[in-house]
């Protein structure tokens, strides 16, 4: 299920529309993940405040969206573009790859909430495929 | 047996009471057929599913979307025993319709996205949690009689 030329075009166009709200998207997606999938909190025991919209959540949501932006810019070779992030996740963070799907789902929910008209089925399928490709690139060096 | 908090019970009743079934049902099913195109395998006799526009304009898809969404009514009314409520429907999907039960999860995800779009900011993280828990119980119950 690799990205077609149509998918890439859709992702770039959609991202151009929404990237102005990137920090809000990241903050809300991460907040939802921590509430709806409480097992994900195990990765953040070093944070003082895991509540929705807290300072560490907002900051980290922004960091994650930075990675997504990088992936959009590298959409023709996501693995190459995310190489150092991939190594970070494989050797230091070691986040179970199942969680990439969980976060991706929450990003899609936030896109639906914030952009109900633009996030139509065609944008949805392109973003879903794109986020899956990002997850695959991040887990590439795991084993 | 599934334990529901008062918040979860109230949230599920409220979300479904406010829902426009004629809008959400067709939107969820057509989104599923677009986002997960292999689900089209069950709708060979629905006519034109050639592209997203055709799917979203297809009257058979719309009608079936409403049917499926109304199928959730019984679970909303019987939250304390969804498994028993759906035993017959589970057998139907397994033996007659032969639907891979993973499809229930895919449709549930699309329904979540559609409801999120309709409710906007009112679809808070807590509401999302309750809604997804409800759908997870429904999905599990529909898969229970497969063997």
Image: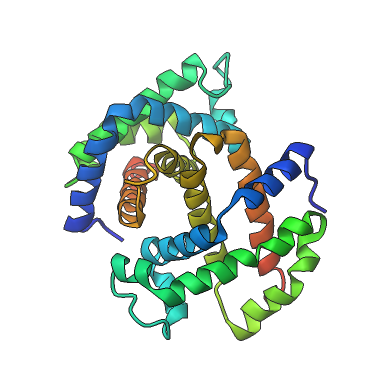
| Way the structure is coloured | rainbow
Q: Residue at x 55, y 76 (%)?
A: B99
Query: Is residue B43 placed above or below B128 in the rendered structure?
Result: below
Query: Considering the image in quadrants, where does the C terminus of chain A appear?
Result: top left
Query: Is residue B92 placed above or below B7 in the rendered structure?
Result: below
Residue B65 seen in the current view = yes
Q: Is residue B98 left or right of residue A76?
A: right
How many labels were placed on the picture? 0
x, y percent for residue A129? 33, 53
x, y percent for residue B60? 45, 77
Residue B101 seen in the current view = no
Query: Is residue A38 placed above or below A124 in the rendered structure?
Result: above
x, y percent for residue A9? 18, 50
Q: Residue at x 63, y 47 (%)?
A: B15
- Residue A132 versus residue B54: which sits nearer the camera? B54
Query: Is residue A96 placed above or below A2 in the rendered structure?
Result: above
- Residue B112 versus residue B10: which sits nearer the camera? B10
Q: Is residue B127 left or right of residue A22?
A: right
Q: Is residue A113 left or right of residue A41?
A: left
Residue A68 image-quadrant placement: top left
Query: Considering the image in quadrants, where does the N terminus of chain A appear?
Result: bottom left
Q: Residue at x 82, y 55 (%)?
A: B80
x, y percent for residue A60? 42, 22
């Amino acid at each position: 299920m690799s990205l077609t030329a149509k998918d890439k075009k859709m992702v770039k166009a959609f991202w151009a529309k929404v990237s102005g709200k990137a920090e809000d998207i990241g903050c809300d997606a991460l907040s939802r993940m921590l509430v709806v999938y409480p097992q994900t909190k195990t990765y953040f025991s070093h944070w003082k405040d895991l509540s929705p919209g807290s300072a560490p959540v907002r900051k980290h949501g922004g960091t994650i969206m930075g990675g997504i932006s990088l992936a959009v810019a590298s959409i023709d070779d996501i693995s190459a573009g995310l190489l150092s992030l991939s190594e970070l996740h494989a050797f230091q963070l070691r986040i179970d790859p199942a969680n990439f799907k969980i976060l991706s789902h929450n990003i899609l929910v936030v896109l639906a909430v914030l952009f109900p008209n633009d996030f139509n089925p065609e944008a949805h399928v392109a973003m879903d495929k794109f986020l899956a490709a990002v997850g695959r690139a991040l887990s590439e060096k795991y084993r | 047996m599934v334990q529901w908090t008062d918040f979860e019970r109230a949230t599920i009743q409220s979300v479904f009471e406010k829902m426009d079934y004629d809008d959400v049902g067709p939107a969820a099913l057509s989104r599923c057929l677009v986002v997960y195109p292999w689900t089209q395998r069950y709708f060979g006799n629905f006519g034109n599913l050639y592209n997203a526009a055709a799917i979203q304009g297809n009257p058979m898809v719309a009608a079936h979307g409403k049917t499926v969404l109304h199928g959730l009514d019984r679970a909303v009314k019987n939250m304390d025993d969804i498994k028993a409520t759906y035993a017959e429907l589970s057998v139907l999907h397994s033996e007659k319709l032969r639907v891979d039960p993973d499809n229930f999860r895919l449709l549930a995800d699309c329904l979540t996205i559609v409801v999120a779009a309709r409710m906007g900011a009112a679809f808070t993280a807590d509401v999302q949690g309750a809604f997804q828990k409800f759908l997870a119980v429904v999905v599990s119950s529909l898969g229970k009689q497969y063997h």
